[in-house]
Structure formats: C-alpha cells, structure tokens
Image (cartoon, rainbow, N blue to C red):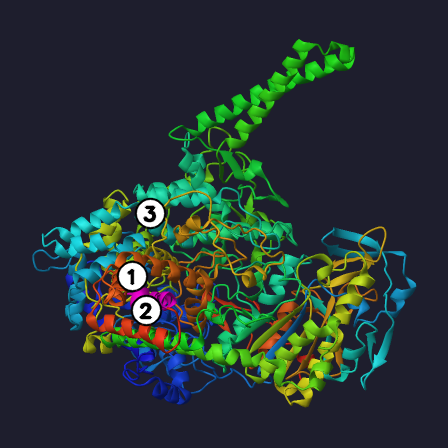
Amino acid sequence: MSDDHTPHGRGFCGRTRREFFWEAGASFAGLALAGLLDQGFFARQTRAATGVPFVNPLAAKPPMITPRAKSVIFLFMYGGPSQVDTFDYKPTLYGLDGKTVPVKTKGRGGERNEGRVVGPKWKFQQYGDCGKWVSDLFPNVARHVDKIAFLHSMTADSPIHGSAMLQMNSGKIQSGAPCLGSWVNYGLGSVNENLPGFLVMLDRTGGPISGAKNWSSGYMPATYQGTVLKSKGPPILDLAPPEDMPLDAQRAMLDALREANEAHLLSRGDNTELAARIASYELAWKMQEHAPEAVDLAQETAETKRLYGLDNPRTAHFGRQCLLARRLVERGVRFIQVYSGGAHNDDNWDAHGDLVKNHEFHAGNTDQPVAALLEDLERTGLLDETLVIWGGEFGRQPTAEYAEGTGRDHNSYGFTMWAAGGGIKGGVSVGETDELGSAAISPGPGHGNGDKPGFHVKSLHATVLHCLGLDPNRLSYFFGGLDQKLVGVEHVEPIHEILA
Amino acid sequence: MASGWTVQTRSWFAVGLLLGEIGGGSTAADTTFTRDIQPLLARRCYSCHGPDTHEAGLRLDQANSATAELPSGMRAITPGEAAASEVVARITSTDPDLRMPPEGKPLTADEIDSLTAWITAGAEWSAHWAFRPLARPAVPPAAEGTSPIDAFIESHLIAQGLPLPRAADKATLLRRVTYGLTGLPPSEPEMRDFLGDDSPDAWERVVDRLLASPHYGEHQARHWLDLVRFAETNSFERDGVKPHAWRYRDYVIRSLNDDKAYDRFVIEQLAGDELPDPSADALIATGFYRLGLWDDEPADKLQARFDTLDDIVSTTGQTFLGLTINCARCHDHKIDPLTQRDYYGMLAFFQNVTPMGDRQMNPAFIERVIPAGNGTVTDAEHAVQDLARRRAEAEANLAAIHKRLAEHGQQALDDLTRKDLAAWENALRDLDAERASLPLALVVSEFGPDAPETFVLPRGNPRAEPRPELRVEPGFPEVLAPPAPAITPTPNGRSTGRRMALARWIASAENPLTARVMANRVWQWLFGRGLVRSTSNFGLMGDPPTHPELLDWLATELVANGWRLKALHKTILLSRAYQAASTAHPEALARDPLNDAFWRFDQRRLSAEELRDSIHVASGRFNPRMFGPGVYPTLPEEVLATQSVPGAGWGNSPPEEQARRSIYVHVKRTLPVPILADYDVADPDAACPVRFVTTQPTQALGMMNGDFLHAQAREFAARVRREAGGTNADQTAAMVRRAVEIALVRPASDAEVNRGVALIDTLETVDGVDPSRALELYCLMVLNLNEFVYLD
C-alpha cells in the first residue's frame, strides 16, 4: 500500500489557501481517499475478500461483473403492505370474504391453521401493455407497470418486525451484520466525495424500529454505514457550523488547524493517517459547501415539484424524498433508502386494525411520488442506471387477525415486492402465491429458500448486487473466522427471470 | 501492500533459519511450514482439499493423505521431489482448466517458489503452532542488561539487518504510557515530575504509579468489554434494558484494578455461580452470558435458542481461546481442524443454561441477590429467605385480621385492632422496601442439575433428527489433545457443573491457547497490535505470530507470575521495545513498512473513549467518579429522531455526570452515541478484538461543528482564561500558551503562540468575532489538532 501511493502530506505545506484549493480541484480526491484507513487496518484485514488487502476502501472500485445499474433507490414500505390489496391480484378472494377457510399462517399473533378471509378492499384494473392487474390504491404507479418487474412470491424468515427488518436490510435476522447499502459501498466504493455513499431518509413520524441497526455497517468499518439525510435543516448531522461560527471564521480556524497539523506532520511524513486526517477536514469543508446543494430543491422546476406532489400536503414529504433521491442518484450516491412509514402501529403499513384506513393513508401518501420518481428517472435518462426497489419487510395475511374487523397480521410466507430500472426487465411478474395469496407456491426450490418454493430475501439481495456488477456469491468480508457474504453461506442466484 | 507481504515472507524465512539455530526448539522446516506453507495451503487449498472437503480424494492438511497415492494414481506431494508432485504442476499450469486454485488469482511467483522449496526440502508437516503445548523458549543470547523481550526482538532485527530502535524522548513516553495504561493524558505535574527525575528507576516508578491508578482498570476494562460484546440492551424491536448490566462493567474494572489472577477472572465469568459459596463478584461475573443479543419475539424459538447458544460458544471460543469454533456450527471447519462434534461438544457445556426469558425477561433466570460489602452470597440468600419468612408472617397476620373483621363486621374494629392492622401493614411495606433495596445482579442460571442431551445438528438445523450416532457429550476440541472434562454437579442442585469443567480447562496452565491468547492481548493493548495480529483467531486463517518465541515466552511468564496481568504489563513496559521512538527510519520503512519487526513503536490514534475523555480533561469538566449505573450524554435531536419512539430508553444525565469517563456511558445497541460511533467504537453485537481506525469527513464535521465539541471548547476557553494570568498586553499570548500546555501537556513554542495569536487576531479583526468567542474557536482548533488526537 505504501508503494502504491504517497500522499504528499508535506506537499501543501507553506502554500496559500488559494493554491491549496486550486490544486485540490485537480488532485484532492486521490489524497483524500487514499489512506482514509490506517495501515494497521489493512494489516488486520489481510484476508479481506479476495485475499488481497484493499488499497482504498472508499475509492470507486471496478465492478466484478458487467454492471447494469450504478445506484439503488430502495423505497422501504415499513410495516408490511398487503400484497392481495396492492399488486397480487386474487379474484377468488373477494367471494370468500367473511368465510373461514383452512390456511396456515404465522404472524405476531402466532401460528394458525384457519382464518376468516378478509376480501381485498380495493378493485383491481389492468394496466399497460403487459396488462398487469393493480389495485386502486396505486393508480399512478400502475401507469408504469411496463417498467416494473413484480416479485409475487417473496419469502422471509421472520414475520416479526424487528428481525424481519434486519433481514430485509442486512440478510440476517439478528443485528450485527452490514446492511445492503454497506455491502454495495464496500464492493463499489463511492464516486462522490461530497456526499456519503449510503443515505437513508426517514418518515416524518420517526425511524423504523431498531433505528440505526437498519443502516448499520455491522462488523464492517463505519466507513460503510448509512447516514441519515434529514428532511429539514442541514441534511446531515453537524453539516452546518453553529450560528456563532461564521463560515469565514470557521475557514480561518481550519487554516490554522491545517498549518499546525502540517507542522506536526513534518517529522511524521510516513504516517498516511495523519495526512488523511488533514485531508478529511478539507473534505468536510467541501461537503459542507456542496452537500446542501444536493438537497436544494430551488433548482427544480415547478412542474417537477408538482409531478412529485410537493404541492399536496399528503404527498409533499415522501415526494420531496423521492425527488431528493433522484438528485442524489444524479450526484453519484450509490445507495439511497427512503422509508414510507415510521414509528409504530398505523404510522406505518402495519395494518392490524383498520386495513382500509391504514393502506389508503400510506398508499395515498406515496403513490404519486413513486410514480413521479419512475417517470422523472426515465425522462432524465437515469432509469437505465438506477435500480428502484419497492417493498416492505414482509406482507400481510389474507385472513383477519381478530374476530372482528379488517386488520391483517404479518405474513412472511409470501409477499410482493417490485423492481424497476437498471438491469430489470419491465412488464413481467414472476413467482406466485396460492389462490388466497397466503404463501409462495412458485418458483420451486432453489431461490435461497432451501427446499421451499418462492424467492427468499437473499435472492432479492443477490439480484441487487448482480445488477450493480457485484457477484453475490463472491463478494465477501472476512469476519469471525469466516468469509461472510450478504447472501450467506449457500450459493444464491439472482432472479434471472426479471433481468433484462 | 502486495510487495509488503512478499518482503515479510522472505525476511521471515531467513529469520526462521536463524532461529532454528538459536532457539533450538523449532527447526527451520518447522518455522517455514507454520509461517509460510500452512497459511498458504489454508487460504488457497483447504476449502476444497482440507479438513471438511476432500475433492478428488485429496486433503492437504495432513501429511499422510497429502503424500498418498490419489485415486487418479498421482501423488499431490512427493516429499523431496517437486517434479513428481502434482501440486507443483497444477499451481504452475497455464491451462485454466488444470490450474489450481480454480477460483481467484493464481498463486504468485513467490508463493510458488516457497511451496516448491518446501517440497524439495522434504515437505515436513508440523502441528499448528498455536495448538502445540506451551513451553518456555530459550532466550536468545544478548548483551548484559537486555531484557528477554528485547533479546527476542533485537535478535530478529539484527538478523534482518534492520536498525535497532531508538529510545523515545521522555515526554513522548509519559504520554504514551499514561494513555496506554489509563486511557487518559498525563497531568502537568506528572509530566514535570517525570521530566525532572533523572534517577535510574524514574520510568519504573511511573509504571508502578500508573498500574496502581484506579483509571488503569477503567481503561483495561474497555478492552475487555469489547471482547465480551458488552452492551446494556437486547437489540431488536424493544431493545430492552438488561437489568444491572453495569455491575458487570464495574466488576471488570474492579477485577483489573485488583489485579485479579486471569485464571480466576476466567473461572468467575464462565462459572462463578458454580464456585462453592460464590462471592458477589463471582455471581456478577456470570453476567458474561447475558450481554449478547436477545430477540424477545423470535420468529422461531428453537432457532433463536441455538443462535443464543452460538453467541456464547462463539464469544467463549474467540475471547478465551482465540478459536473460531463458531465456524463449525453447520459443517466441519473448512480450514481449521475443528469438527462439528467439537462445536456441539462445546455447546453441550452451555446446553442447560436458561434463556433470558420467554418474551419477557425472567428475573428467576437472570437476577440474583448479591451481598453488600464482604458478605457471602449464602448470607445474602439467607437474608432473602428471612425476609420472605417475615413477609409471609405479616401477610398471614393481616389475612387473619381481615378474616376476623369479615366475620364479625366493623364493630370488631376497635382501637387496638386498628393499631394492630396499621402496624402489620407498615411492616409489610417496610419489608417490600427492604426487598427492593437488595442489590441484584444480572447472572447466568441453569435449569437444574440435569442437562438435556446434545446432538450434532447437520447444517446447523435445530430440527435435525437426533440420531444416536450424532449424540455428543460435553467435550473440548480434539485437536488440542485435551483431557476429558471433569464434571461434578453443584451440591446446591442449581446446575450441572459443566461450565465449571470448561472454565477449569480453559483456565489451566496446560491449555495451549489461553495464556498465549491473553499474553498476546496484553501486548496488543500496549503496542496497538498483537504479536498475532488476529488476536481472536489463533487458527490457520489467523495471522501467524511475528515473534512466535516471544509470544510463548510471554505466555509462560504470565502463568509463572500467577496469571497476574499487571506483572506482565510491567515486564513489557520496562522493555526497550515499548520505549522505542516512533520516528521513521527510511530503510527500515522501505523494507518493513508495517513494522512487523518492531524497529519502532507504532503511532496510534486515540480510541473513541480516549478522545472524548481527553476533551473533558482539557475542558476541566472531567469527572473522575467511578462505577454505578450508566450515564446518558445529551444526544442531538436528529439522532433521537432515528428511533421509532424518539428518546425512548435514553435518559438525560446532569452535565457533571456526562463528563464522567466514556466507559460509564450507557450502551444502547440501537442508539450509538455520535462521537463514539464516529471514532470507531466497537459494535457490541459481536465480540470485537481489534477496533477499526477510520478517518472520515463525518468525524471532522462532528469535531468542528458538533454541539459537544462547541460546548467543551467554551468550557476549555473559560478555563484557559482563568488560568492564563498575564498582563493585558500579552493576555492573548498567555492564553494561547496556556491552552497548548493544558491540551498537549507540553510548553508552547513561540511559533505556535504567534500562530495562535494571529488566528485570534484574524477572527476578531477580519471576521468580526468577539474576543471571547475568538478564544473559544482557538480552543476548538486545539482540540482538533492531530497532535491532540494521535500518540507517538
């Protein structure tokens, strides 16, 4: 590593601020990124991934296979939307409303062998050239079905929010593993040094349960963890100096700091960490300057804002986040996660009580913004290189949770997610649930599910990595004596049926 | 980096030859095999031709099978004849269908050379270095007055033609050792005393003083807490508080301050409850079992049960033994000679341990009353029984009175009865208060003296059929040639005694790993890296020791000194190696850039806790109060907003409490504290043997813009103003001087005073900042200095 680059820590000593910045424009990236981890770190990680140490954990890295997408926008419908009320059309279910049928379910209320059917509460219509049936909850998204690949037989290992959230985000039902966004940044690095490579936007009601565990880098260094992008005020924690430190004063302080640090570096020129730390302050200064621009919607036209529903209080919050997601993709951010729903109960898609009220609310808040995102990405030419994922940590049961009412309990035996954009074939639907929509019945075994049918969360993760040019079965990180992989020990194929 | 590895391999090959002559204990071939060949085979070959998988009938981890005739009629390895060894043909083949390994990059020319040379030299296998019995190696001959540590290190340096280390200056040394032992900077008087003390034992007295400091235990405990995945909540949806977990943290601090023998420390944590009449500490120590993740609402209870047991096996294996036994949960270990039977044999020791509870944490499983002061647990439990008896008596009497009143009506409620009733009611209330004030600890417990059977679970599937041939008894990993466990159920009938059998084996001098692993950790804590860098993986995938004989010498030293860690610390601290300068030597740097040979002392960044504590020391707000329940630093609103219930499970301690050492900050799994998380605090979901050291712009943002830094900079400036003195004319210079002295514990140079004054002047005159704020910003700058954050 020390042979490969020599950060010229001493080089900018004695230069004026102006000279430094002029040069920074040309060569700063190399200096800033090189050596952001210390040599000891490299030494400790001698078994990382390929057996060859990483030279630079944050620098953009070549993909392992031909990439189909550069960025991911994961629209996380926290709480678990009901598949049979949204995209998984089950015509026979309407007629069964109120009837008790034998069906094996497992949710927060435990395991049952029969239940009272709650018929779908919305009508379905066919849309697009593919004739996809979509419920009236998503009239806007429905206009884009020809761009979308629907995965109707997703399965997860847990029907309980805490562990299911962890699995959807990190592949494991226990906390402590790096999240999908961490793996993507670990595998590909980041091309924009002014913004973190893994950004998370939360619902206005609060974070999801387990909070920061949902964007943790787990056993990987914090370099790869998600950063929360705030919807109000400075977008990132501590991005803005406090009011009583004007920018000029801050710059004067940073100049003095740099000068002192350079003097300190003189006799320690071989320590790349010290040079990297000097560089990190300049990088922070640049982030401070440029990151607000990324979230400044003043540059967007009125038409665009309307498209995302920013003029409507119902859609304004999620619409703003979807628009931000497009702007972040434009700026090279690798992985963006946007939460619909936060906190607990009906603040998210967790419709245990009044299904209609809950889903009307959340679908109504998000339908137009999601459609706008797909449309906007397409018209700006970004859709081809942006993978959009939609879904929750699980789905919901076709039967009622309680003796009365329309509330549905959690369901990880079969649920719907969808993907669109870079690397994805549009207008297709793959995998099926049974005629009640309660459990996956196809495709057969071999999709991360052991001997059971359906597409396991792991196969979705494999698909995301594959589309980004990473081999899910080779992207590994040595920890705890094992080459850990996002998709686990067993070989997992991406979902070829939806790949363009 | 690639070339760095090559340099390392070659040079150590040479050293190996030399040591073979000096040490007498190991041969050149032996050293070559363990250092060069076995790691290469393990990394590149064993996953298909190793302990678990024998593709094409070949396994390369054992001499007899690797040299045997294969089903194909060929021999993979023919000792002494590289040309007749199929391995050589295959690793050098240019035909991608034939070349081995089939995946990843081909072996490098250097790797091929060393493998070929080893085969030509006779292809000798030897047992993995860490699994061999521990024996005291001979100390290389050295000049009189050379400590054994320096004899080992310097003989290697000389053999490699590397320069011997230069001594660091005294100020550097004091700062290094004070942080190294206590995690805090030296005070100004301590610095003055040491610099002014020319007596030959000045250094030794400093070492003794620091080893006796109560801050020693706090800092060393932080290392240990990383290893036992210490956190005070369960993670998952509710992330509930583990009751009394802080007592475990205090136990660790106290034990290390008291220099508790390490073997005792091990036994208490693994089986303190199975000691006869355990002390309070012995019970508190077993909180070890309760510190991990716990899903209170698992999707699959049986799976969750085995995940919990896996956490215990994994943490125990890695922390005490440096073994990643966890890798053999689903199948035999791919690389290390650890079988699934070994894994489940280890798991069997814990099979009877109760869970945290079922949905709710169950006090009957996880809490026990502990005695105050020097009392015994038996005394405490007698007190509890006595309380229970008195409570029953009070209840019975109350019940009798109420019954009488019910039978005879209110006319029976005369004055005396009224008083009698009130007295019993008061007594009941007092007894409940007394019960509530009894100190409780978070402990392990078992379901009783009989454990359920344990079976190997193929593919780790907890629902695998328990076939008789898969049944295992508690047992230690076979490769260590262990004794049979001596298991005796505890006389009180509470538990099986299995954990005590395990603890006694781990804590024995005959265990080849325990002392090596711990001696290596002590070295790591002082030098920043272990002699074995992978400090929790002494297996084949771990890094081989850079100084194997030194490691064994230290391990035997630890045992010989009654497992006292302070004695080992002192031995190391008195070495020249520890007192070496950190400055670079161009040639040494070129040849050994990672400083494998210890030609200098490695510079290091402060840990997250050291940094936060140092800021409090500089600001003058540092509160040295020790022990007790965790403290809650004020968190920015946007951090709390990431929770599903913002602020849930987080308190707000008064400012003076927040200024206590970071080890007392409440560890909530789902709510990391920004300054600690930014600076790479351990993720507590798994044992963390080595922390990352990352450098990222988000750290800089927090350090220049964050609330915590600005608040501390204000306090620091106020202190500087108070302490600076000086006349009006040179007031600013005096304050700058004072700020440097406080933060960096050294005099300020005139040049830096001038620069500081210039900054303050610019802030006031150019940027229009008022004088007091200008001083604060100057102080903020000082807290951001690389010199403040790094040690030489």
* Residue type indicated by callout 3: Gly
Label 3 secondary element: helix
Alpha-carbon span between mark 3 and mark 2? 28 Å
The answer to whether residue B473 is visible is no
Q: Residue furthest right?
A: A95
- Same chain check for tags 3 and 2: yes
Q: Residues within 10 Å of mark 2 (few under 14, many from 20)?
A: many
Q: Nearer the viewer, mark 3 or mark 1?
A: 1
Q: Which residue is mark 2?
A: B785
Name the kind of residue labelled 1 in the image.
Ala
| Quadrant holding the C terminus of chain A | bottom right
Q: Residue at x 33, y 45 (%)?
A: B256
Query: In the image shown, does B590 or B354 lie closer to the viewer?
Result: B590
Q: Residues within 10 Å of mark 1 (few under 14, many from 20)?
A: many
Q: State how many labels appear.
A: 3
x and y, in percent, of residue B570 in the image: 22, 50
**Span colored in magenta:** B771-792
Front residue of B108/B557: it is B557
Q: Position of residue A284 (x, y in %)?
A: 44, 75
Please name the residue that numbered disc 1 is placed on.
B743
- Could you say whether the residue bearing mark 1 is in a helix, strand or loop? helix
Front label number (3 vs 2): 2
- What main secondary structure does the magenta stretch of the protein show? helix
Q: Chain of mark 2?
A: B
Question: What is the number of the mark on residue B217?
Answer: 3
Q: Is residue B778 magenta?
A: yes
What residue is shown at x 56% (from left), y 75% (from top)? Answer: A472
